[in-house]
Every structure is written in structure tokens, then in C-alpha cells.
Image (cartoon, rainbow, N blue to C red):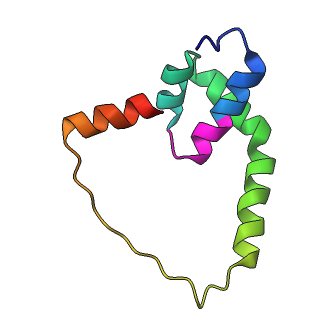
Amino acid sequence: MLIARQPTKVKELLVDMALNGSGIRDTARVLQVITSTVIKELKKKESQLQQVNLSVLKQLNSESVTVDICLVKLDQAEIERESEAR
């Protein structure tokens, strides 16, 4: 998929990747843009992204929230499959 000529699509994917935990360098590499572009676009969207998080936090009852943390060890093949899926 050639996305370099579709700036709107790049911006959408950039935000989606950030929300899914991708780092600045990873995002830039995958979308074939420079890191300053990623940072610039995320700063433009910062207020919108923060509002989403704040609205969710306001709805949560912190007394009833539990968090399960588990560690997963992936082998190299699984890591490669995961990166290809993105």
C-alpha cells in the first residue's frame, strides 16, 4: 500500500499507531516519514487525544478498577509476525 502520496491517510494512521502504543521512531519508519513529522502531527492532535483519555477516566470508578499485569516472552518469530501485522 502506497500511503506516502495520501497525507490524510498518513495522519490517520499516525494517530491510530500512537493510540495503539507505537513509538515515534516505529511510526515514522512504518509510514515512511521523518520523526519530526510524527511529532508535529501528534502535537496538533494532542488536545483531542487528551480529551478522549480524560472522558474515559471520568467515567471510571477507581474503587472498582482492577489491573492484571502479565509478562509474555515472545520468540523472534513471534516478534516478526507481530511487526508485519502492523
x then y, percent, for residue 48:
80, 49
Is residue 41 left or right of 73 when viewed as pictured? right
In the rendered structure, does residue 86 fall within the stretch colored magenta?
A: no
- Count of number-bearing discs: 0
x then y, percent, for residue 43:
73, 38
Instruction: Tell me which residue sits at (78%, 67%) in the image.
Output: 55
Q: Magenta stretch mostly in which secondary structure? A: helix
In the rendered structure, does residue 21 fall within the stretch colored magenta?
A: yes
Instruction: Tell me which residue sits at (76%, 58%) in the image.
Output: 52
- Which residues are the magenta region? 15-22
- Above or below, comparing residue 33 to residue 25 in the picture: above
- Above or below, comparing residue 52 to residue 31 in the picture: below
x then y, percent, for residue 28:
54, 23
Is residue 50 left or right of 67 when viewed as pictured? right
Instruction: Tell me which residue sits at (27%, 39%) in the image.
Output: 78
* Quadrant position of the N terminus in the picture: top right
- Above or below, comparing residue 68 to residue 4 in the picture: below
Q: Quadrant of residue 16?
A: top right
Is residue 69 left or right of 14 when viewed as pictured? left
Instruction: Tell me which residue sits at (49%, 21%) in the image.
Output: 29
